[in-house]
Amino acid sequence: MRKNVPQKNLLSSTLSLERLSSAESQSLVSNILSSGWDLDEPSTFSISEDFYYLGTAFTLKVVNPTEDDIVIKGVESAVSFPYISEKLIFHALLFCETDLTVSVYLHPSNDAYTTVTPFTQQIIAGRWMPAFSNEYTFGDDEVPFASVEITIVIQTDSPAEAVFFTLPTLTLNEPHEYNQFYKLSTTMFPDIFKEVDMESDAPKYPFAKIFHSMTADASRAMDKYVQMSSFETFEIGHASSSVDGTPYNTLTKSELTSPDLMQPEYLEWGAMLRGGPTISDVKVNNVSVFDPSFDFRRWQVESAAFGHAAGSRQSIKSAVSNVLSGSRVSLVTPLWQGQQFQIMIRTLTSETPGNLSQGATSPSVLAVAEPTRPAGFVFLHQTVNEINFILNDPDFGVFNQSDLD
């Protein structure tokens, strides 16, 4: 069994009736009514504005003017790795002022819903109650994805009564199997607990799922810890792999503290160790100055150029290099023309963005350098066609006083 298959709703926001911000609600309602759930005629449905179970999801109000069965169908949806080989189940909440008999079919979209055996349940009048589908596995890991559909057939003796439908969810039927705390608990509970749990249906494994609901967050935190701490200290010296051909052993680095290995969700935490939060982007005239492939947030954590290293010559050079091409060389000269608080940045004309001529100023260079600027100082920028070696130039070193590099 694979590890760490996260439990989530596999349906799209349209099919799951998800209610987002109020600004997006109108377009979501339109999508739900036009391309989300569908009904067999003569039934009709609308979005209920004044009757709902939770404010995080829309509620469909279904009306059937005849005594025929109500058939609700979800548009074709795709399930991909790693969920395609998992045991999946669909469930939703229904409400009606009269008793209902509800059969829910989870089936491949290419097959008629009658090709699978549904789970059928009674919905008691006047109460929100769950309706479950049959369990289904749509393929194996060799198949990239599978198309699925959900069909809900509702029988009622009172066609005038509206049926309300909300919180549709397609998810793992046995999420507790990936819960570390549940696995440990099975050794502590009597066998009869598990035996009775296995015999239950809709929901299947009710005791295990209650235990999972209480410990799921803690289990996910433990999974993260195990992922970051896969090896014991004594094992580090026995590893032979390296990072990018360097002598650094992969096991001497941590996903939690090494910027080049750190997961994206940890970058903001890593930035705190560097002196402050990351900047999401640098724009000039509302256009990003970076190549789309450049991982700007990771660079900030790696370099600390906008954190505790800000203000140094190296931080300015490192920041400016991110918008240059070619050799990405730059000169950073303080005390420009004898002015105590002016710092001149010079870059090669051919490597500076904007198709500039010699002596021009690049807004992109100044914008990306700005977070590194020492308080009270002013940055200037100028393009040059070539960079000449100048004795006593502070950028290369003052003769007989510092190393030339």
Image (cartoon, rainbow, N blue to C red):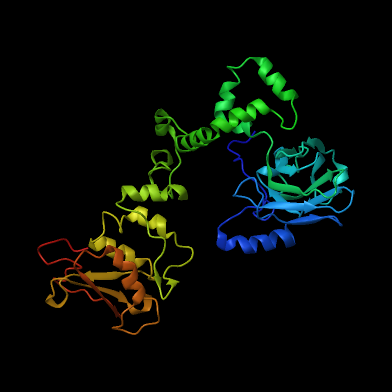
Percent across and percent down for residue 142 are: 71, 45
State the quadrant of the N terminus. Answer: top right
Question: Position of 43 compared to 56: left or right?
Answer: right
24 lies left or right of 45: left
Q: Quadrant of residue 308?
A: bottom left
**Residue 259: in sight, yes or no?**
no
Q: Position of residue 266 (x, y in %)?
A: 43, 47
| Depth check, front residue: 199 or 292 | 199
- Residue nearest the viewer, comparing 56 with 100: 100
Q: How many marks?
A: 0
Q: Residue 385: which quarter of the image?
A: bottom left
Q: Position of residue 124 (x, y in %)?
A: 77, 36
Dividing the picture into quadrants, the one containing residue 401 is: bottom left
Image point (80%, 35%), residue name: 121
The relative height of residue 283 versus residue 50 in the rendered view (above or below) is below
Between 13 and 172, the residue placed more toward the observer is 13
Quadrant of the drawing holding the C terminus = bottom left
Instruction: Residue 322: give x, y in percent of width and height.
Output: 38, 66
- Considering only vertical position in the picture, is 42 above or below 390? above
Q: Is residue 322 left or right of residue 81?
A: left
The residue at 74%/26% (across/down) is 200
Question: Can the viewer see residue 138?
Answer: yes
Say if 52 sits above or below 371 in the image: above
